[in-house]
Amino acid sequence: MPSEPSDRSEPLVAEHVLEFPGGYTRSVGPVIGRFLTELRDGRLVGVRTASGGVLFPPAEYDADGEAVTDEYVEVGPGGTVTSWSWVSRPRATHPLDRPFAWALIRPDGADTALLHALDVGTFEPGADPPRSLRTGMRVRPSFRAERTGSIRDIACFRPDVTMITAPSRAEYRLNAGRALTRFLDGVSEGRLLGHRCDVCGKVYVPMRGLCPVDGVPTTEEVEVADTGTVTTFAVNNIPDPRAPQVPFVSAYILLDGSDISLLALVAGIDADRVRMGMRVKAAWKPREEWGRTMENIRWFEPTGEPDVPFDAIKEYL
Amino acid sequence: MGEPCAVIGVGQTEYRTKRTDVSIAGLVREAALRALEDAGLTFKDIDAVVIGKAPDLFEGVMMPEAYLADALGARGKPMIRVHTAGSVGGSTALVAASLVQAGVHDRVLVVAWEKQSESNATWALSTHPPLSPTIVVGAGGYFAPHIRAYMRRTGAPDHIGTLVAVKDRQNALKNPYAHLRIPGISREMVESTPMLWEPIRYLETCPSSDGAAAMVLASESAARRAPNPPAWVHGTAMRSEPIFFAGRDTVSPQAGKDCAADVYRQAGITDPRRELDCAEVYVPFSWYEPMWLENLGFCGEGEGWKLTESGATGLDGDIPWNASGGVLSSNPIGASGLIRFAEAALQVRGLAGEHQVEGARRALGHAYGGGAQFYAMWVVGSDRP
């Protein structure tokens, strides 16, 4: 390749730092001096203007050029954001190393606002401003522990506390009880067990060891089929970790031989083709995955048999 | 029914998705202080406080009544917590009424609340405990199959649920406390929202709300001294039934029919559609309006959807249901039943504002909860019974 002509070479570049050794010294005068002295003690003060307002931060002159009085007024520490600008990618010299807002903050009791950094939480670089950041937001200064009499004695402002999180956790040891244990023992062997009530003769699957209508204990064990009929159902469009996909169908299934329907998933068919009266069969997981849990049955699937007429299921709705 | 009992004060908070401007205690006080103001009383005048809310898991505060006792001025007074799932607002009012009817107290403050924004109700109602032999899919997933069964049983056309969803939200536009206020709400708008739990569409369900409601219930002598017109209690009833039993009618549960029959008997009502002027009925999914119209005897079985379709339950119909906008427009769960009872009282007191049913003199307040297994109802009227 031919070399570049000499008049198109890169310009020469060099770094240059301009920094007065030790920093400039500034005499602050009596008014700003009072402000900084109070700041070092953790207080915000403004100064009364000739027209009666409170200028904050104080200066020797107000906006009209009139000299201020010598009356200092403690303001804040609470204040209100009057305007703000979001910094999504802070620079090295910024007071915070994560996204923050430059905000105009008017402390309570002051008539003018101070520009300072407002920390509204932890965000990834480049993040959009949170919805909570708005004009009118109530904030307070966060003072540094070690103060020197500098505007940086305020590390930043922070929003008032409006919300806390309250973690709570309860741990239980659930005892299935005799009836449910027996039912799940049956499921672990691929059998669906129920009880027949001595009084009304109704079969409850799973059994509860009692008849809720007659109020009597039940003991007569009955094994029912793993086939049944959908009595009614919902098509759920809200995802659920136990369902194969959305939409999924949760259906009341009346097992053949049972007198009460059981809420279970129906799959193996498009949700919009599920019908009241549709015949279904349990879809068991592979036997080696069985345990003492109803999860042995993944869901119920259509058998392909003709639908049961409505009259035959209407008493079970 | 015992001694006469009247509602002499009603207070409600604004219902919103998030009431982050107040704590739980601030929320219940907001309602309580408004009820006391309506009654011309202070906490000092109150003999006992009855408080209700739905499961503690919603806010994660165990036994919140203990923490709220001071906030409700209950120090040194009897305080009772009631919990009957979604019907709790209604049964809380009935426990308070029974204290007056029994002649135990003269002035009872009753408060119910929920601050749903502190967690998530679907999470709290679907905790997926291990060993469970059946699945749980939240309130919508529970009720959707029963709505489908109602539609199949009665042959109701698909759009009936949409009509109720529109009607109640139109009413909500007249209620300054209502949560869902949707200008221009229309059938097209409801029908364009997704099916969450088919056959229930998004806008056919209730919102999740923060809010509280309160009432002051009074004996006859206390009611006579109240600054504003009282609503007299004409009948109260509660019923419950197990969630699962063979032969249960889940579409029109027997406990609801029995509860209605009891409250009508006490109030001397034989034809609720004609003898009541309006009703505030717990309808969290729009299809429950036609279902409860039948269950509560406002029409024959299979006729509820026709009544809804005819416009009879609209604000200008012959039997307005949920003039306030109902649960479909505001649903701080634990308070929702009490709001029904309180709105029924406001109607017969003539204090319902823009959603006042003209000339209302007798109204039904209704709440249900759990798997449509707990019922609470009262009939209130302008006249002392």
Image: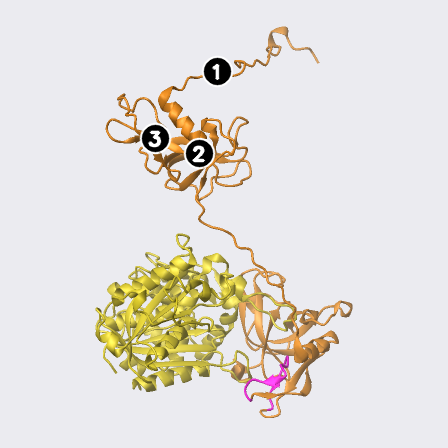
Chain colours: A orange, B yellow
- C-alpha distance separating marks 1 and 3: 25 Å
x then y, percent, for residue B244: 55, 79
Question: Main SS type for the magenta part?
Answer: loop
Identify the image quadrant of the N terminus of chain A: top right
Q: Are marks 1 and 3 in contact (CB under 8 Å)?
A: no
Q: On the rendered structure, is B191 left or right of B220?
A: right
Q: Chain of mark 2?
A: A
Numbered disc in front, either 2 or 1: 2
Write down the residue under mark 1. Answer: A24
For the residues beneath circles 2 and 1, the answer to whether they share a chain is yes
Q: Quadrant of residue A217?
A: bottom right
Q: Is residue B327 magenta?
A: no
The amino acid type, in three-letter code, at marker 1 is: Tyr
Q: Are marks 2 and 3 in contact (CB under 8 Å)?
A: no
- C-alpha distance separating marks 2 and 3: 14 Å
The amino acid type, in three-letter code, at marker 3 is: Gly
Residue drawn at x 35%, y 57% is B182
Crowding at dot 1, Cα within 10 Å, few <14 / some 14-19 / many 20+, comes out as few
Numbered disc in front, either 2 or 3: 2
Q: Chain of mark 3?
A: A
| Nearest to N terminus: mark 2 or mark 1 | 1
Label annotation for residue A42: 2
x then y, percent, for residue B111: 38, 67
x then y, percent, for residue A12: 60, 10
Write down the residue under mark 3. Answer: A46
Residue drawn at x 48%, y 15% is A24
Residue drawn at x 49%, y 76% is B149
Name the element at disc 1: loop
Magenta-tinted stretch = A201-214
| Nearest to N terminus: mark 1 or mark 3 | 1
